[in-house]
Amino acid sequence: MICECSLQVRTYECDSYGHVNNANYLNYLEYARYELLKDVGFDYTKAISAGYGVFISRIEIDYKKPALTDDMLTIKTWPLKKGAVSGTLAQEIRRSDDILAEAKVTWAFVDSKTGIPVRIPREWNVPGLGPDC
């Protein structure tokens, strides 16, 4: 399953060189991960209400080319692996055919009160969190 979403670069996201500031790529990637969760039927709001969360434990980003003001970006997200407690997603930010950034994101399912990773309960272990769907 590959989730694809789009957004347009806004002027205030750019640095003095006219490029999207590197920190804003984290926001783009987060937006796309949330869209993936919605697409696979994972209700994040209900998970939070039930005392759980999906915390990011690691992000690796390779910046390839700069994004510029008004660029239309497409962000693709897909699962690479999933275990009983955590998983890894791949993400790609594109401008048309150009790959601007590639990321690998490791997440963990946690008890939101303690922040301690826990096994994903059956009701939250939806198809699409892992690559086997």
Image (spheres, rainbow, N blue to C red):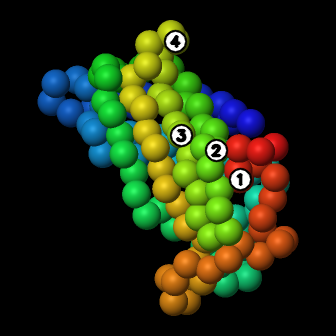
Secondary structure beneath label 4: loop
State the residue position of label 3.
90
Is the residue 84 above or below the residue 10 in the image? below
Whether residue 94 appears in this view of the structure is yes
Amino acid type, residue under disc 3 in the picture? Ala
Report crowding for label 4: few under 14, some 14 to 19, many 20 or more residues within 10 A (C-alpha).
few
Amino acid type, residue under disc 4 in the picture? Ser
109 vs 58, left or right, is: right
**Mark in the foreground, 4 or 3:** 3
Amino acid type, residue under disc 2 in the picture? Pro
Contact check, label 2 and label 3, Cβ < 8 Å:
yes
**Mark in the foreground, 4 or 1:** 1
State the residue position of label 4.
96
Secondary structure beneath label 1: loop
Q: At x 77% / y 45%, what residue is drawn? A: 132
Q: At x 60% / y 43%, what residue is drawn? A: 80
